[in-house]
Image (cartoon, grey):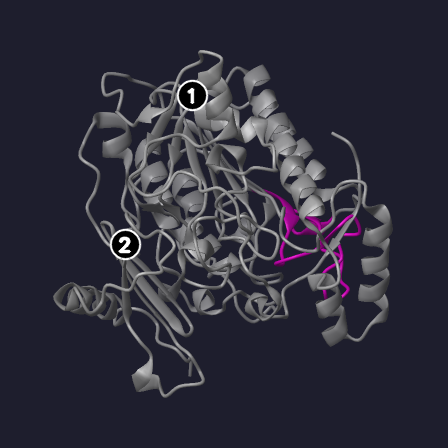
Amino acid sequence: MRSEEVARAERGISRRGFAGVVGTGAAAAVVGVSVPTAQSAQSAESSGGPKEHTFRAASGRKSKRPNILFILADDLGYADLSCFGARHISTPNLDRLAAQGVRFTDGYSGSSSCSPTRLSLYTGRYPGRIRAGLEEPIEDSDKVGLDPTHPTLASLLRDAGYTTAMIGKWHCGVLPDYAPTKSGWEEFFGNFGGSLEYYSKLTSNGSYDLYEGETTVKDLRYYTNVLAERAGDFVQRKHDKPWLLNLNFTAPHWPFIAEGDTEEAARLERLVRELPPAKAKLALAHLDGGSLDTYRKMVEGMDRAVGHVLRALDRSGQTKDTVVVFSSDNGGERFAYSWPFAGIKETLQEGGIRVPNILRWPARVHSHQVSHIPVMTPDWTATLLEMAGARPDPDKPLDGTSLAGYLLRGDAAPQRDLFWRQTGERALRRGKWKYHRAVDPKIPPNKNKDVLFDLETDPSECADKSAQEPALLAALKATWEKIDATLIPYPIA
């Protein structure tokens, strides 16, 4: 991989405050539509290659316990991959991954911001069940994080005989009390905070944030490439047990630094070092930088990094027996492309939570498939535990629903509600229907409107059906409030 530096930092500013309107363009595959819109699918069809078809389980196949590679992008918009409809971004490696497995058109993140979604993946539970999940997201502070005693995907798989590792962004608390190595990952190489500059590895508070285990390690090359190199080394290592690797890229999260943008990286590094903390946070948020072209380069660079890791997996001879899942921690920001959805990161509109989801497992799942069932981050936790033969902790029951029966045995798709909660907003999806309420601080709380959308015919959430379906609206609202009553309330005392 080519080299570069980085300096990115933790949040410190509301993305809502500076993010612009979602990008426009041609629609990717939407709810209930099985026509492939991806450039890769189009080229395959035009050349006589296999067409994408509706998912069907290969129920007769058997396999051993799989390795698990979970790849998480950061702030990637729904249609930022060419296999999900991107017009101006080319992602051949992720397109190939989708063609070799299943593309999920109705994939969702567990939250609309970074660390709550990561908590929902690591624990399989709603973020609101965990004290740290009420931070949206967690700041660079040692005061809150994922309790090391809480069972995680990694700790449960480790106890079931897996080797566990995380490479990349953790964002669930910082040292000395919180770390992947305290929560079930036996190995860690990456950053603790929410953001860093890609070359210098500086956060918005001016600290250096690249660690091996719990010790800082210097590497001033371009971060996306560094992570890919480390992940490639891990998968090619001689393993005597099945393994879990969480590969968490920071791309394409701000600052908007593509490989080779060393002059702009140096400018940001200088600002972070010289400005007072509040202004340094704004500098790293890069409100005065970035472009559609830079964003394109960042996404394409991440795609090349994914390709590097997948080729390493091929060389190791483990591809057939490795489950690969790709997703994003939430929807995109200023330069992301999420058409046809409204909203951006930090909103519970579709553009804030609908994200690309891909699964590949050659030993058990056919290629060239598309699924329209709704799936969200904690479902993957439940699914991967079942695929690996590991049991959830009965004292910390999962909120995610396993899709293993649907994917592997031909069971009917699970019927359940998808629930989201964040400060000032609520949402619940049941089938094609979505209940949503966003609080407008300019009007009295009792005047904030509950709305209802038919996502099958109106994925852009423009036609409110609440007046036409009052009983359904009331039922979805009551279900949301019943779940909410079981969570830690806002505000925290």
User: Left or right: where does residue 405 sit relative to residue 334?
Assistant: left
**Which circle, 1 or 2, is nearer the viewer?**
1
| Quadrant of the drawing holding the C terminus | bottom left
Magenta-highlighted residues: 187-216
Mark 2 burial class by Cα count in 10 Å: few <14, some 14-19, many 20+: few
Which of the two discs, 1 and 2, labels the residue nearer the N terminus? 1
User: Left or right: where does residue 353 sit relative to residue 446?
Assistant: right
Please tell me whether mark 1 sits on a helix, a strand or a loop: helix
Hey, what amino acid is under mark 1?
Asp
Mark 1 → mark 2, Cα distance in angstroms: 28 Å
Hey, what amino acid is under mark 2?
Pro
Q: Position of residue 168 (x, y in %)?
A: 61, 45
> Which residue is under mark 1?
321
Q: Position of residue 430 (x, y in %)?
A: 23, 54
Give the vertical position of 318 relative to 286 (above or below).
Answer: above
Residue 292 in sight from this viewpoint: yes
User: Left or right: where does residue 306 sit relative to residue 215?
Assistant: left
Q: Nearer the viewer, residue 438 or 174?
A: 438
> Which residue is under mark 2?
397
- Magenta segment, prevailing SS (helix, strand or loop): loop
Give the vertical position of 292 relative to 347 (above or below).
Answer: above
Q: Quadrant of residue 155?
A: top left
- Residue at 47% in and 66% down: 132
In the rendered image, the residue lying farthest to the bottom is 444
